[in-house]
Amino acid sequence: MAEKKYVYMFTETDETMKNLCGGKGSNLGGMTKLGLPIPQGFIVTTEACTYYYQNKEQLSAGIVKEIEGALAALEKITEKQFGNPENPLLVSVRSGARVSMPGMMDTILNLGLNDEVVAGLAKTTDNPRFAYDSYRRFIQMYSDVVMGLAKSRFEEIIDEMKQERKIVQDTQFSATDFQEMIARFKAFYQQELHEEFPSDPKTQLFGAINAVFRSWENPRANYYRKINNIPSEWGTAVNVQAMVYGNMGETSGTGVAFTRNPATGENQIYGEYLINAQGEDVVAGVRTPSPIAKLHDDLPEVYQQFLEVAKKLEAHFKDMQDIEFTIENGKLYLLQTRSGKRTAQAALQIAVDLFEEGMVTKEKAIMLVQPEQLDNLLHPQFDQKALKSAKKIGEGLPASPGAACGQVVFNVTEALDLTKKGQKVILVRLETSPEDIEGMHVSEGFLTARGGMTSHAAVVARGMGKCCVSGAHNLEINEAEGYFRLGGQTFKKGDWISLDGSTGAVYGQKIPTVPATISGNFEKFMTWADEIRRLKVRTNADTPADAKQARAFGAEGIGLCRTEHMFFDATRIKAMREMIVSDTKEQREHALAKLLPMQRGDFEAIFEAMGNFPVTVRYLDPPLHEFLPTDPEDIKDLAKELNISEEKLNQKIASLHEFNPMMGHRGCRLSVSYPELAEMQTRAVMEAYVNVKKRNPKYEAVPEIMIPLIGDERELRFVKEIVVRVADEILKQNKMSVDYKVGTMIEIPRAALRSDHIAKEADFFSFGTNDLTQMTFGFSRDDAGSFLPHYYEKRILESDPFARLDQAGVGSLVKLSCDLGRSVKPDLKLGVCGEHGGEPSSVEFFHRVGLDYVSCSPFRVPIARLAAAQAVIKEKK
Amino acid sequence: MAEKKYVYMFTETDETMKNLCGGKGSNLGGMTKLGLPIPQGFIVTTEACTYYYQNKEQLSAGIVKEIEGALAALEKITEKQFGNPENPLLVSVRSGARVSMPGMMDTILNLGLNDEVVAGLAKTTDNPRFAYDSYRRFIQMYSDVVMGLAKSRFEEIIDEMKQERKIVQDTQFSATDFQEMIARFKAFYQQELHEEFPSDPKTQLFGAINAVFRSWENPRANYYRKINNIPSEWGTAVNVQAMVYGNMGETSGTGVAFTRNPATGENQIYGEYLINAQGEDVVAGVRTPSPIAKLHDDLPEVYQQFLEVAKKLEAHFKDMQDIEFTIENGKLYLLQTRSGKRTAQAALQIAVDLFEEGMVTKEKAIMLVQPEQLDNLLHPQFDQKALKSAKKIGEGLPASPGAACGQVVFNVTEALDLTKKGQKVILVRLETSPEDIEGMHVSEGFLTARGGMTSHAAVVARGMGKCCVSGAHNLEINEAEGYFRLGGQTFKKGDWISLDGSTGAVYGQKIPTVPATISGNFEKFMTWADEIRRLKVRTNADTPADAKQARAFGAEGIGLCRTEHMFFDATRIKAMREMIVSDTKEQREHALAKLLPMQRGDFEAIFEAMGNFPVTVRYLDPPLHEFLPTDPEDIKDLAKELNISEEKLNQKIASLHEFNPMMGHRGCRLSVSYPELAEMQTRAVMEAYVNVKKRNPKYEAVPEIMIPLIGDERELRFVKEIVVRVADEILKQNKMSVDYKVGTMIEIPRAALRSDHIAKEADFFSFGTNDLTQMTFGFSRDDAGSFLPHYYEKRILESDPFARLDQAGVGSLVKLSCDLGRSVKPDLKLGVCGEHGGEPSSVEFFHRVGLDYVSCSPFRVPIARLAAAQAVIKEKK
């Protein structure tokens, strides 16, 4: 067998090799093939990363040898030599996973410098300031990333020197100052680590490669992977690339640009650059860069060349690109291209445009929008009337659109504290950094004083689909003392502000919001998705309002209408409680008779709200004690109200106590014990149907009755007999006939295992994946919060199985159930009504196993529609 | 396709057709083929019963026609005619299911009588008293069984007539009295049902057949099936048989006899008969019958003939037989034969004897004892010393052996009430009847004043393996007022008595008991079982005492040594609680260090108690809050003891509260959160091993460590890494090496589904079928008591899935797990340690799916050994 190859030159790879070479490296290979100006380099593969972790975090001798070989090849290509002061090869060392994880892992620039090389560089470039600036940056980065010396300690030295020299900006340092700074840095390094700063370039190189691999497992990266569902097994590649310099003077520069506007999708180059700067200066947001259009004035030829390159890249990769570039002494170099992160609005615009420009097929266009992104468009926007009367207190860059309203917080801790209490917060920072990621995740939006449209805050906000206003220059912030001033007002932690990410406006108040609607591009795009998808999308809704919202979002019926919520209303709970404390069937029937007209009315309203779409009504599910009071005063009142003794009521409540109510007397078990409950609910459903049909003879939907918590076909048969008896009697009385359905939830593992038997009694199955996940894992959803964090931390679980279907375990039961059910009833209707019904990866799974529909909350309906279309496209591949 | 045949003449069937014709009918066919004297008749099959229930409880025209044809054939065989006063055919109509359900269903005798026929019968038999007695009995039975008029109403009429005539016994009634009685019965019938008593024999016949089918579903029969695990789908057959009469005078009689002694197994005819009586008189226990030996004096030829018949039947059926016979005018008729119910002691004796007599093979002998029966022999017997000083207060017949001690109850309600409170009871009755079945089931034993060795109480007691003293004639009982007098003492409800079912002695006090031992026939028989079985049998034991008891009963290791019980000891719980309320790892380790030597000591003692048999130690399983106090006073004390504030302790307790602790923070999840727990337990196990091995270098067993509640292979990997690290360190320190095992319980459905992955990390699987049943059904064992009774009542479940493995659901997961596990690790050791490990039908299942061992409580070890042997034999068939 041939030895596995762990290192690839850029010329040996292209974008088809993402899994092995990472996104960044394989795209650099692809661009090389296109003949674009790329500083050359090589890639240490993701498989080397896997090896590294399996081999106690060490590279093998073979990998080391391959790297040395690639380095020699790179020396040949660039005609420079590593460590040669006369003609030095300097490199950058960067991470590059399959998918972009911006800012999550480590990067080292200017590697290859030491005291001799820097002197040579100063001479050959005739630019000593540049050379020593690069060297001090390298020492800083290397010490931080490879050796773990905090960056802030070096910043302190810089600050000291500024004070000594009475200067304010880094740009005011001279070459001699940097030489002094380098000496102080090295002394600090020696003092802290008891060894000299490494002067051997190869030592530096391997140190950096190891550090990048290590950074794959840093907490930020782990957290990012968790929220983005990226498996830790993927690993990262390392890119070693010849350095080019944007900081060599006024004909040098560096920038990032998108081939289209990432906030709106507009088809126009969009980006920023800084003259005489290195890339980190742009991203860090320390200096505010110029818009890309200004390059036309500064370096017109380079601008023209860049426009051509951008068109070429977009045409090649068939998507909007996010390009990093550097200009070295008037020559353009591309450092990276990747599909650009974009807002949901931009994603839709770009997808529609690319299709209409003839650049992509409809199917490819559908794949250009991530279903989860739509969430962003579906959430409320500011109430326009309220907005008019609101007073703007300031303005920044419209870095990520949408409306956000929340209480001010200044750091991660505050953000977590307040959101844990259920508050909405807005994170206000001078500028954000990767350390803030967790706090950003829980915030409604971000407001920063510094940084441009491609600053950390802006990029992260668009990735998360959150609102961001960046670079609000008038904002005076004191993070240490916890306040900011803007528009003459002072705001402290907990004060309310509102942000408009589409205009950049900041408001010093709470502004009411209104629901989103689907129109324009969104509507057009969703129509394409609907043409492609096979899965129907229903909604979980218990009220006419929810039903209407879901229809507006494209729901094709209700897959789960819970009936218990209807009993919690203050006017109804009394009758419910009377039913529960009954001693006899007669007493129960008496109380149920009071509930009947109320429940019937609910169903009529919901049926009418759904027009001709079907409504699946689930019978009472929770344990009865949930309806009883727990507070002694409430119990006293209730006893009086029900005209029974407090003692009796307390006894009743005690008798309903359960050790594990999740697995107790609930669901269909209630109807087995009290058939009159199923009778009343059937009466309510069928009489509601009769009334609706009488009012509107064109009403077409048929009632669908769903029995929860079935574990055995005999249970279903028992309850179904009640349903059929009562339903047929009501239809007969009203001289009507309708092919109503009686089905069951599959949410008990045993039901999945016995689906061939249960299917004989059921018109449909609806998977209740919430309960099925609980029982398949043996995880109580209410209690798992105490130990699941330890499971993530120890990498036993990668994601919350209640949010994202566990396909390997719970999913295998779903598949088994589908197969068994259809084996006896090929046309058995199959759906899902657990919360997974609106989660894209789960929707894809449900498509694959052949369900007829998914049902999810109204706000997730468009997400499910898109995910269902993408599932069809992915399946074709 | 040929029409299905629903009716068979006795001559058309034999004992191979039990499923279709029922046990009684097919055996009557078999006896007919043997040429034995059988009153002929026909059988309406169990399939007709199934049809009856599927067809709204009605027979089809075809079945009616077949019955009429069979009746005509029977008239031909008997040369009598149905309804012909000159030469009347009278029949009995009886139930007969696949397995005997004594007394559970209905029987009607003397059918075919009406006013004309009875007159003819009186004339042809020249015995008017007999004829009218038969007729009044028929009216009584028919009214009760077919029409639902309570028997007691007729008894009231009889009592009235006795008072009028100032007589005491039924035998004192004259023929004329019976004629008067018949008139009163009919009048009562007319008054209650507004119709005349049916005089058409065919109407009577079809009424009776329908009634027998109906009786299959009466509550008694349902209850009997539930406790005996008989599926209700089996249905019953109906036997229609020509009547013969034991009540025709002094050369007539009726009796029941066993071919061997059903209490001891002694090879000697054993039974009772009554001269001039019908069968019901014997079974009802109203008159005390004579022992069968006395028949030698009364009717020597018949006695001789009976002995020959008994030998013939036993040789043919290869088992001890229970025979019902009637003598009509000096001629012997056999009404029924079946394998006789017997005590466990008798079953062993008979099995051993039949093998040693060469009548059956060893394998057949093994099948002659029901595993559950052994339970009886394993339970304590009276302490002989205590027995010597005990004062006997009375004596009855030794109807079913064993010792019983309990509090007196007089009826089912009292029995259920007291046993629900955890008390042991003895049911004391004048005589028992089928209505008492539920109360008998919960009692330790029965004491009756009337009835013989084959009375209802005696038969049921032997079937249930309970102690019974019957026919204690000196016992004066007042059931209505709730007391009895015996030996000059008065006993009320709740007073303690003791019964010796082997001697018939009754004691008015509590007598201590001693454990049973295995010796003699029992030992010999178990050796045979051990030769045959493949499954190993281990025990669940947490103490050296339990371990020793289990070894005495043949356990081959401990399959489940729970470690949590060890922490509840008063001296230990403090350290445990200290561990639980710890805030840091250091505090937890400090507390665990106190527990280590205690736990290590426990393991040493248990390892030594098991000799060279392996011990599987399960790590801490329950949620931690189970170790904390709930009473405010206790909390106060604990806070003081632990030197923390009450408030802090209350907070800690509150933070540990769970909504569904069964699916909460427990099992391996504790070690994931607190790895120091697994460390301490590993240390305790391995150091105990080291110490035992040092003391006894010949010690051979290897430690088996079992991780509970695994749902994913990564969980197991995580905990296993801790175990291996600590274990290897201890072995290294002690310069020892041992191939210790680390395995897992499979008790979470997901673990079963992912067994191919989990097997890679596990040395063994042990199925925790208790939890697996809970989660597969979604039944909380602690709460299911509130609804499972409704499930039995409504026939949704036939048996408690926690007692008897649900093979269709839970079993299918067990099988899947075995197959998946062995697919990646063919030699994976598989066992079960849930309570099903000692239940015979479940043991058979575990054998079939290929487990290596079952583990059960010490007292069930012999049962599992026998069940495992029977599984091998059944599999061969």
Image (tube, coloured by chain):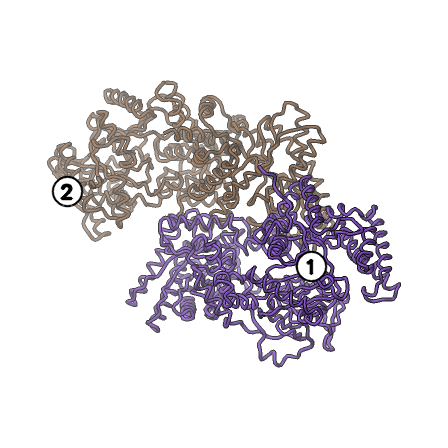
Chain colours: A brown, B purple
The residue type indicated by label 2 comes to Asp
Q: Secondary structure at mark 1?
A: helix
Q: Residues within 10 Å of mark 1 (few under 14, many from 20)?
A: some
Q: Which quarter of the figure has residue A442? A: top left
Please identify the quadrant where the N terminus of chain B is shown. top right
- Residue extending farthest to the right is B164
- Tell me if I can see residue A671 in this picture: no
Residue B89 to residue A216: above or below: below
Q: CA distance from mark 1 to mark 2?
A: 105 Å
Q: Secondary structure at mark 2?
A: helix
The residue at the point 80 percent across, 51 percent down is B86
Residue A562 to residue B499: above or below: above
Residue under circle 2? A115
Q: Mark 1 or mark 2, which is nearer to you?
A: 1
Q: In the image, residue B227 lies at what x, y percent?
A: 60, 57
In the visual, does B325 lie left or right of A795?
right
Q: In the image, residue B241 lies at what x, y percent?
A: 69, 53
Question: Which numbered disc covers residue B434?
Answer: 1
* Chain ID at mark 1: B
Q: Which quarter of the figure has residue A711? A: top right
